[in-house]
Amino acid sequence: MAVKPAAPPTRAALRSRRARGVWLTHAALILAILIISAPLIFAVIKSTQTSSIVLSPSLLPGGAFFQNLSGVWEDAHLGRYMRNSLVVAVCVTAGKTTLALLAALAFVYFRFPLKGAAFTLVLLSLMLPTEVLIIALFDLVSRDLNWANTYAAIIVPFLASATGTFLFRQHFLSIPTSLADAARIDGCGPLRYLTHILIPMSTNTIGALAVIQFVYAWDQYIWPLVIMQQDDKQVVQVGLRKLIEVGGQTDWGAVMAGAVITALPPLIVFTALQKQFSRGFALTEDK
Amino acid sequence: MNRILLTAALLGLTNVSLASAQTTVEFWHSFGDAKRSGWIQARADEYNKTHSGVKVVPSYKGSYNDSLQATILAARQGKAPALVQIFEVGSQLALDSGAFQPVSSVKNVDFSDYIKPVINYYTIGGKVNSLPFNSSSPVLYFNQDLMKKAGLNPKQPPTTYGGLIKACEKIEAAKLDTTCFGMSLNGWFIEQWMAQQGAPLLNNGNGRQGRATATNLDSQAAKNIFSFFKTMQERKYYTYTGKLEDWDGSDAIFTNQKTVFHITSTADIGNIRDAAKKAGFSVGVGVMPIPDGSKRNGVVIGGASLWISKGVSKPQAEGALDFALYMTNTQNMAEWHKLTGYYPVRQSSIDLLRKQGWFTQTPLQLVAFNQLTRTVPSPATAGGLNGAAIQTRKIMEEGVQKVLGGQNVDAALKETKARADAALAEYNANFK
Amino acid sequence: MLSPGRARPTPDAAENAVFRGRALPWLFLLPSLLILAVFIYLPALQTLRLAAYRANVILGTEQFVGLANFADLLSSPAYQQVALQTLVFTVLTVTFGLLLSLGLAWLASRPVRGAGAYRLLLIYPYALSPAIAGTLWLFLFNPEIGLINQLLGELFGVRPRWLDTPSLAFGLVTLAAIWKGLAYNIVFYLASIQNLPGDVMEAAEIDGATPAQVFWRVAFPLLSPITFFLVFTNIIAALFDSFALTDILTRGGPYTGHAGATTFLVYQLYQDGFVNFKTGVAAAQAALMLALVAFVTWMQFRLGERRVHYGS
């Protein structure tokens, strides 16, 4: 560490420097937050305006939010898109977590041939994002599996998680082996050990992972766009585009209401799991 | 294994027994809005009530592009829907896919009642491949109030490029804080302007005598169109959202009175009229302005038609056609027109509407009609066919966009032609 | 996604072979491996195969063309332009995105009153998807009816053509992408900054280091593992998440030179594969992108192992 050994400042000087710094910090943060939030504040305000003033520069909140929302919720099927996205995001999150837990269990608590190869296979999948594979995946899912227009098409391909397996493995490795030894001696099998000991000890990692997976699944766009040709199973992100391209007058107040509502589920999940989220990642920072 | 076989056999049996009782006709369309999909569903319900042997099941399958793709994939799995709505630019691709049969081969249909330009578009190689359904063409929309403010007569909207530019000069002088003219940047309009000048877009009889291998974008006709955009851009008379094919965006610009003139499909008459009423101005409709000195040859039909899949049973194909004919019968087409602004594609529907006094109540529609019915039949106005039409349309749009960005017309046309011709060659290579 | 700076492709020596059983571990691995095999590795191989064909998914035609698709792509000025645009876009979003979010996370971690509220306000945009971002910006920057131009027109009499001036459209998409990514990066930086050894920095400060020195000489090196991790995820996000943003905001346009100014690799792939139905060409593009992602991943593993300064 190369810090310039200048004349040590007095405590008072340090304090006054800090006071100035504090003031600047507040100013900078408030400015940044205003800029970052501006598009969102704009969206929220516009979502409350009636269609006659939504296109004007007026930024006064109106009272038409629910009117705007009910327009898109029923007529433009936003409610249906939301439900579909919710089903998909919950299934993907739960599935990914389960599969990753099982895989990590195998990698940490068993010795078996080809373990290294299997682990590499899991990790290497990070190099093959679905977006790149859509051409071939489209053929596979729609023609060979005949899954076009099913939930399975947008859930199953995403169930394996290299990230999750990796994170759980790291976490399990940090748990003392003696615990597992004791459990085994007590006649506890691996699955029981997983459900009774490991999972309760991994809530932070699970929570952190869940947030990321949920948001990832919720944000899916290109794959549902190509594989879901039937509107009644479409997800909300693609639905948002359909709100804009209605084949007539785009009702921007309604679109903004739709955008605001679409952002809510990840927000709720994130808020609910915020503690686990930061702790989960903190854990992987120092073993 | 045994169980799978058994299940398969059982499923097969139920299918057979169902089929003997009732023929199901799947109908995939591309109308996601309540107004139009509701209308289709209502027709299907009526039809099902009166035809006990057939059950028509309409469903929305996403955009034209999506439903075309979905149909072909379904066809490959042997599960094609009997009836599909396909957009006009997808016609050659649909034909080449081999997934459809010409409607004229399912049953003998008398097509004499259909308006000529419409049926011409879908007649390929002497066969009527698909049944016209929702058809439209572009017209000029204008804001009558703003025109008056600029000292223009809304009774005499411009009918030529030159006329439009003159009107723009007046609007500029009146300082209305609006742009003169706006439209969605869409290859469809370029195709229309080629047809208006009687110039085929593609070689080989506009792709109707043989596969098109080249575009006629080096013609004077194409130059007229690109030059028009150049002038409009240089004099700041033209605006659009900046996105290609942004129909809704450009409509919004017009209905928010940011432009005085607007060109878009006749299918938007209803929506634009309503939006204008809300915004508090009165809208007028005129013929599509064309290059000066050109004879008005008329328009190519746009919209979509109904195709019947090849891989379906005979009763299904017949049921599909029968329903399609029912849905597009005289009465229904007249109603469809009133609801949406799409043309009633039958002469008898037009007669019916005339009898009902519809055109005196809604003079806006009359202009659109005359533009269509006065179209001079020729390969140019029959419309260009090519399997890469979705791509060539976009290439033309990008060419215009380059002109708008400052490139000179000749260079832009040369590049556009080269790219479009390459796309045709690339498509045609699939058949070697 | 990888844990910061800890990516090791092979399991390390810490094998706690507690439980016995030959079939059991494979049984636990089976679901994951099966899905990876069917939905990742099989399509990857299929992509490579398709890349050697002229294929059209609608026509159902396939003709073997060898490496012609690759040769055409690599020599096509349009594809070169798209690749270059993607590179510039990626470098800009990753660099500015990370610098900004590191700065903001650092400020929000200062012991000031209300820091908790600041932190929350900074990270809640994480809930925004690229599609929402595209939707909001599309409305804001519509040249005629968007708020930005109405305000600019009113105040300064200018109405920039945001979506069809190539440089503006490119800048707009880049800005939107940076904006969209900020919260995600801030989340990770905040978590890491909170785990920095406070005593070390306190000591540095008392030793007379200015806040800037504390930041660059002490905190920044300690944050290098998370920075590395974020560089990687941000590159991937710039390559792929940009799709929804551009699809809604610009549709890849405006056309300039030989391609749309905001057409990036994934958007081009989608256009050719699912709009123009040039399946073989699209597969070849996918193969090239696979190579690119593989390269980025490999760099991450390699540099992650060597250069990263570990916290403790």
Image: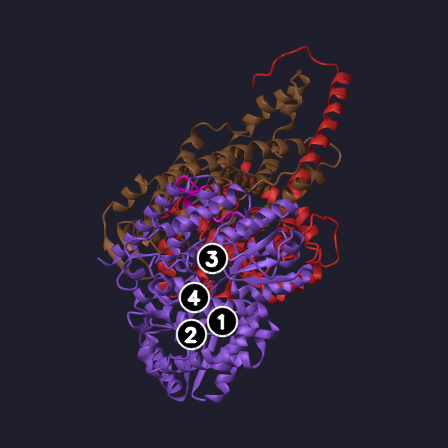
Residue B353 falls in which quadrant of the image? Answer: bottom right
Which chain does the residue under circle 4 lie in? B
Question: Is label 2 or label 3 in front?
Answer: 2
- Identify the colour of chain A in the image: red
Q: Which of B168 and B201 is in front in this view?
A: B168
Q: Give the range drawn in magenta.
A: C248-266
Q: Which chain is brown?
A: C
Q: What residue type is labelled 2?
A: Ile
Q: Badges 1 and 3: C-beta atoms under 8 Å apart?
A: no
Q: Residue B237: x and y, percent?
A: 55, 46
Q: Name the residue under label 2.
A: B115
Q: Name the residue under label 3.
A: A225
Instruction: Please say whether residue C265 is one of the residues in the magenta stretch.
Output: yes
Instruction: Classify mark 2: residues with Cα within 10 Å, few (<14), some (14-19) or many (20+).
Output: some
Q: Mark 2 and mark 4: span between their CA atoms?
A: 10 Å
Q: Badges 1 and 2: C-beta atoms under 8 Å apart?
A: yes
Q: Which of B381 and C96 is in front in this view?
A: B381
Q: Residue B301 carries which label?
A: 4
